[in-house]
Image (cartoon, rainbow, N blue to C red):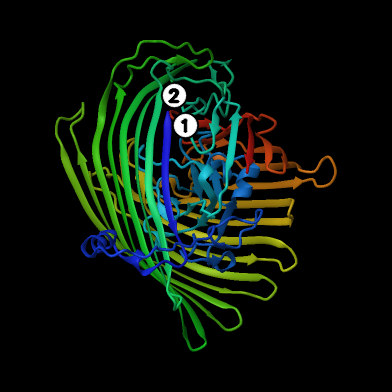
Amino acid sequence: MSRTYRMKSLLAGSVAALAMLPPMAAFAQTVQTGTQLEPVLVEGEAGDGATGPVDGVVAKETTTGSKTATDLKDIPQSVSVIGRQEIDDQGAQKADEALRYTAGVFAQPFGADSDTNWMFIRGFQATDTGVYMDGLQLFSYGFGGFYVDSFGLERIEVLKGPASVLYGGSNPGGLVNYVSKRPDFERKRYVETGVNDAGNVYLANYTHIDENHNGGSFLPYDGTVTDRIVNGVNYGRIDPDANFTEPSIDLYKREQGSIGYEFEHTFENNWTVRSNARFTASDINEVNVYPNGWASATQLARVEFGHDTQAKTFLMDNQVEGKVETGPIEHTLMAGIDYKYYNIDQVQSSALFGTTPPIDAFDPVYGAPLTPRVSYLNQDLTQKQLGFYAQDQLRFGDGWLVTLNGRYDRGWLEADNRPTYYSASSSTQNSTVGDFSGRAGLAYEFANGVTPYVSIATFFNPIIGTDANGNLFKPEEGVQYEAGIKYVPTFMDGLFTLSVFDLTRQNVPSNVSLFTQLQTGEVRSRGVELEGKVNVTDDFRVTGAFTAYDIDITKDINPTLIGKTPFIVPEVMASASVDYTFRGDWYDGISIGAGVRHLGSSWADHANTNKVPAVMLADLKLGYERENWGVDLNITNLFDKTYVSGCQTTTVVACSYGEGRSFKLKAHTSW
C-alpha cells in the first residue's frame, strides 16, 4: 500500500514587506509590541507562461532550461515540454508513460513498473540523478527514491544534455523536471475516477496500491528474445504474463510525504528574488523473489530479496534575477545558491546463494519452502552538496542572443557501513569533492521564426559507490557540443526543433569482475533529434519525433569492449500522434486520437553479440466530453504485440518484456 501526502504553498506577485521577515522575527514583533498588524495581501496567478498550462501541445516558455522564464527557442539546448493536455491525451498515469513520444527519451526500458519511472536521455540512465520536481532534485540511490503521482503535474519538461551548471550534479544525458499545478485562486471542483486492465482503481489524487510485483522482468535472453532450445528440444518462450515470485511473501509498501514552499517577490525596480525549498521522506519495505537465469532446461533459478529503506531529502534554492543595460546590450542576470541534503538508511538482505528453490518457467508452481534472508548491506549514507551559480543572457543587434553560465559545487559524502551477516565489523568512509561547470550558447533569432543555435556545456556529477580498491567513486565529468535549429512558424501555432550533439561521459565505472568496478570507462553519445508539435486548430493536435544515436564505449578496463555500444538503449526511435475532437451536430465532443511508436533494435550485451529486435507499436484514444463532464478510453499497444523492451547481458538478470495491450478508462466532472 502506498500513500502520498503533499502540501505546497505558492506565493507570487506583490507581497507586503512583513512577509520578507523570518517567521520568528514577525512573531517577536507581535508579542513584544502588542501592535495590531495590518493584513498581508497575497496576490497570485495560475502560474505564468513558463510554469502554467500549455495551450494544446505547443509550449512557448520554460524555466527548466535557464531557471528564468525564457522562450523555448532561446534556450541553447534542446528542451521538450509535455503539457497537461498531452499527458491526458496519452492517458498517462506515470511520468515515463507520458514520455514515450518525446525525442531523445527512451522510457520504460524494463517494461511497465508501477512504482518507478524509468527513463534514459541521450543514452544515459536518468532515473537516479536526472529527475527534478519544480527545479529541486528527486535524488535516488539504491531503493531510496521518491515517487510522484502525475495527477498533480501541469507539465513534464525534458532538458537534454548536461544541466549541472544550473542544478548541480545530474545525469549528463539530461534531466526531467516535473512542474506542479499552480493555484489559480478561483474555486474549482474536479472529480476523476477510473480503472485500468490490472484492476487498479483511483479517485482524485489519492492512490492506494496493494500489489505483488509484476512479472515479465529479470528473464534470460533465450526464452524471451529467442526460443529456449536445449539438446534439440524447443521449449518456446516464457509467457509475458507469467510471474515467478512467491505470492505468500511478496510485498511492496511505500509511505511518503513532503512539504515545501515557493516564494517570489518582485521589487519596484523589476529585480526579483526567489526561494524554493522542499523536505521529503519515504519509507519503503519490499520483499520479492525474482528469476536469476536458467537452473535447468525448464527451471529458472531464483533470488529471494528484501530491503527496508528510509530516505529523506531537504533542498533549497535561493536566487535573484534582474535586467541591466550596458550600451546596446541588454542583460538578464541571474545568480543563486542552492543546497542539497540526501540521507538513506538501508538494510538489504537475501537468502544464501543457491538456497532459493527454482521454478518451472513454463508451468510455475508456487509454495516451495524458502530459507530465511540474511543481511549483506547495512548502511547509513549521507550526501550533501552546496552550489553557487550565475547566468547572463545577453541580447543585442537585431536578434543575437548569448547565454553564459558558470557554477561551482562542493559535495560531501559520508557512508557508515554497519555489521551484516557476512561481516561483524563496521566502518566509515568520507569524501569531499568540488569542481566548476559551465555553459556557453550563441543563437540568432530571424524574423521568420527560425533560431539557429550552438552551445558547449561541461558537467560535474558526484556518484555514490566504491571501486575495486575500496575507494569512493570520483564524480563523473564530461562535455557536450550541441548545434540546432528551433522554428516557431509565424503562420501557425507550432514548434519544431532539430538538434545534433556530441556528448562525452568520463569516469564511468567499468567492471573488473561481476561485483567490482574501476572508474576507467568513457562513453560517447552522438546523435540527432527532431521533434515537432502543432496545434492545427484548437481541436486538432499533431506531434512527431525522431531520434538516431551513435553511442560507443571509448574507454574501458576490458579493451575488447572499446568501440562497442552499451546495452538497453535503442539507437533509433520514432513516433507520431494525432488527436482530433469533432464539432457540430450529435457528434459534438467526440474525440479520437492515435499514435505509433517505433523502437529500434538494441544490443543485449556490451560485447554486442546479441540484439533485441525492433518493434512498432500503436496506441488509441477515444473520448467524449460534454459541458462539464467527460469520459476517456486509452488503449496502449493496441495490437497486443509481444516484445522485449531491453536486455542487460544475455545470461542472468537480463531481459524485460514490454507492456502488452492495456487500457485505462476514466470519467471526470467539474463544477
Relative horizontal placement of residue 416, taking residue 254 as reference (left or right) = left
Instruction: Specify the label residue 654 is tagged with.
Output: 1
- In this rendering, is residue 110 above or below 133? above
For this rendering, which residue is in front, 529 or 381? Answer: 381
Write down the quadrant of residue 594 in the picture.
Answer: top right
Q: Which residue is mark 2?
A: 293
The residue positioned 42% from the left and 70% from the top of the image is 405
Answer yes or no: is residue 139 visible.
Answer: no
For this rendering, which residue is in front, 474 or 382? Answer: 382
From the top left corner, tell me how far across and down residue 664 is, in percent.
62, 33
Element on which disc 1 rests: loop
From the top left corner, tell me how far across and down residue 168 is, in percent.
37, 59
For this rendering, which residue is in front, 41 or 144? Answer: 41
From the top left corner, tell me how far across and down residue 526 is, in percent.
53, 56
- In this rendering, is residue 134 above or below 319? above
Mark found first going from the N terminus, 2 or 1: 2
Element on which disc 2 rests: strand
Answer yes or no: is residue 232 visible.
Answer: yes
- In this rendering, is residue 113 above or below 189? above
- In this rendering, is residue 134 above or below 2? below
Instruction: Specify the label residue 640 is tagged with.
Output: none
The residue positioned 52% from the left and 51% from the top of the image is 181
**Few, some or many residues within 10 Å of mark 2 (<14, 14–19, 20+):** many
For this rendering, which residue is in front, 397 or 585? Answer: 585
| Discs 2, 1 touching: Cβ within 8 Å | yes
From the top left corner, tell me how far across and down residue 23 is, in percent.
29, 59
As shown in the figure, which amino acid type bears the numbered disc 1? Ala
Report the quarter where the N terminus lies.
top left
As shown in the figure, which amino acid type bears the numbered disc 2? Gly
